[in-house]
Every structure is written in C-alpha cells, then in structure tokens.
Image (cartoon, rainbow, N blue to C red):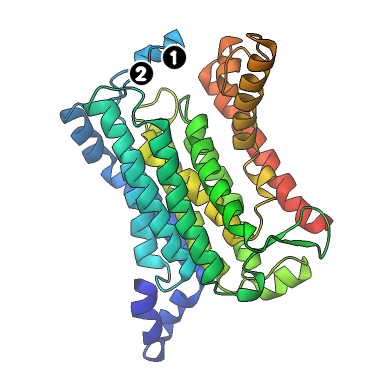
Amino acid sequence: MLYLLLSPLRKYWTGFNLFRYITLRAFAGGALAIIAVFAFYSLFASFLKRHSIGQRVREDVLPHHKNKTGIPTMGGILINLSILTSLFLFADLTNRYIQLAIFLLISLGLLGFVDDYIKVRKKKPQGLRKRTKFIFQILVSLLVAGVLYFFPTVPEVKAKTNFLLFKNIVLNLEIFYILFVVLFITGMSNAVNFADGIDGLAIGLCGISAGFLAGLVYITGHIKISHYLSILYVSDASEAGVLALSMVGATLGFLWYNSYPAEIFMGDTGSLPLGGLLAFLAITAKQEILFVFIGGVFIIEVASVIIQVTYFRITKGKRVFLMTPLHHHFELKGWPEPKITQRFFILAFLFGILGLATLKIR
C-alpha cells in the first residue's frame, strides 16, 4: 500500500524513492510484524483466556503434555494478521506472487481456524476429519498451481525448477508442474503441523527457514546474481522477500511467548498457512528441490512418521522410533523440551547454510 501510494511521489521529494527498494520494504515489513505481535499479544491473549479458548489435548499424547491443557491456542490468528499487515503496507500488491501468498495465507488460515474451533468449542481434540482438511488443502494448492502455470509472469520458466548441485541444469516438468506444486504446498502445510508438538519448535523452525528463503527469492529476482550463480531468473520474484521477512518477524515475535514453557500455542490456524507459505517461497525462488536442505528438519520429521508407519506395517508391530514425529522419540529418551528445540534449531541453521552453499558449488 505504501509502495503504491508513496513511490510515485518521488518526483516531488526524493525521500519517497526509498520505497522503491525491496530490501528496505522487506526489513520494514519484518520489523513491523514483530512489533505488531508484541503490541497486541497481551490484548489477544486476554481475549482467548476470557473466552476459554484453550488447548485440547488428545488422550494418546505423552503424559507430561497433558498439563498443557487450557493454555490459550489459535495464536496463529495473531501471526497471520501481523504478516498480512506488513504485506498490505510494504509489499507491491500488484505483484502476482504477493497476491497468491495472501490468498494462501487467508485460505489455509481459515482452514486451520475451523479445525481449531472444532477442537476447542466442540471439544473434539481430533478437529476436522483428515480427509476434509486434505481435500481443502489440495483445492487451494491446485488454484495456486493453476495460476502459476496458466498465467505466469515469466512464461519461459513457468514449469521449470533448478536442479540441485549441477550448473546450468534445470528440470522442465511441463503440465506435471501443477501436480508438483500441489503436492509440495500440501505436504509442507502438513509438515509444519507435524513439527508443532513441543513448545517453540515449529514456530522457530518456520522463522529460520523463512530467513534463508528470503535470501533465495532475492537472489532469484536479481538479474546479475542469478546469472552469476547460473540459476533461473524470475524478474518479480524478489518482491516475495517482503513476505519472507514479514514471516521471520511474526514468527520471532510469537516465539517470545511460545518458547518453553509456552504461554500460547499457534494451533492449526498458524501451522497450516506457515507451512504453505514456506513451500510457496521455495516455488517462487524456483528452488523446490533445494528445500530438502532449507526445510531439512521438517523433512526429517515427516520422514520419521513415514518410516515408522511403513516399518510397523511390514513387521506387524515393530517400531524404528520410540514415537513419532521424531521430537517425541527424543522426549521418550529423556531429553527436555528446550534441549530438543535448541538442537533442532541448530540443525535447521546448519541445513540452511549447506543449502545456500550448494548455490556456489554449482
């Protein structure tokens, strides 16, 4: 909004020229998002407590998790609104990627809200039926994929993605790119949900991943750097940097209150859209395969569940891990929640650095 309103006024005062720079608007968006969370947290948390909007814990959780019952949840509303505010003020709202990001954020946020509402108000800890959630996620992802494929801003790269490690090699998925995007967004939306099992873990991982993705979308939209690194150039991709740093700001602000012992949970209202947006940022950067590094901890969490379920069925009852997702395995081994969270954060930073390093290895 400010970009559209103030940038044209630079002919009257050169100071308005600052709003043309994506870096300034991205950092401003991140700063505003974290300030917004801090500013409205007390009021928001009081509202949740006043209306008894607290966590409903399933019967099959670990015993020490049952003391989390009643802690305010649906904090994703605060996260989502903070990101949206930053986007509306500092992003170019005519940019296709920003428009799709807003659609994803609102759509998946509403899905998560309904799921959390059923858990809290209907007193059904399982929430929405898994099939219902999955179908809605697919439909939302399909719409985003369709726009990216049939109405691309850069037609020559619409179905392409960078290949990992090798220079000047790209994959052209053609019409199958739609399926690829649908599976990627849906999968990541659920992956963050899997990781949202102990205090501060999922929200911190989202912030770390969004920070690295901010660099990737900027590089992809910078003609000189992208050509130097021999990766696909997408002229308007760097605008998504405003989204990425707004996510960093909102997640760091929320982590202040969600770190152990958590005062509030984000619920599916936050985890579903954040996961979808992380996938979308990787799609915007044309670095979907590189996300194996950038979102490495999320991948490991999901992989642990798949391995556990597969092995359990093949061996008719045996397990690889004590419990999945993987963070629960370490809980049962006696690791305190803060230790698990901090070590997973360290791994996330390590994976992110390795991911960026692969760009130069090319």
The quarter of the picture where the N terminus appears is bottom left
Q: Residue furthest bottom?
A: 11
- Amino acid type shown at disc 1: Val
Q: Is residue 74 visible to us here?
A: no
Q: Position of residue 196 (x, y in %)?
A: 47, 30
Q: Is residue 34 left or right of residue 27?
A: left
Question: Could you say whether the residue bearing mark 2 is in a helix, strand or loop?
Answer: loop
Q: From the image, tell me which residue sits under label 1.
A: 61
Q: Position of residue 293 (x, y in %)?
A: 69, 44
Q: Are marks 1 and 2 in contact (CB under 8 Å)?
A: yes
- Amino acid type shown at disc 2: Val
Residue 253, compared with residue 322, is above or below; it is below
Q: Position of residue 28 (x, y in %)?
A: 43, 61
Instruction: Give me the residue at 68% from left, 18% from top.
Output: 311
Instruction: Give me the residue at 80% from left, 62% from top.
Output: 169
Residue 353, compared with residue 244, is above or below; it is above
Q: From the image, tell me which residue sits under label 2.
A: 57
Q: Is residue 294 visible to us here?
A: yes
Q: Position of residue 47 (x, y in %)?
A: 19, 35
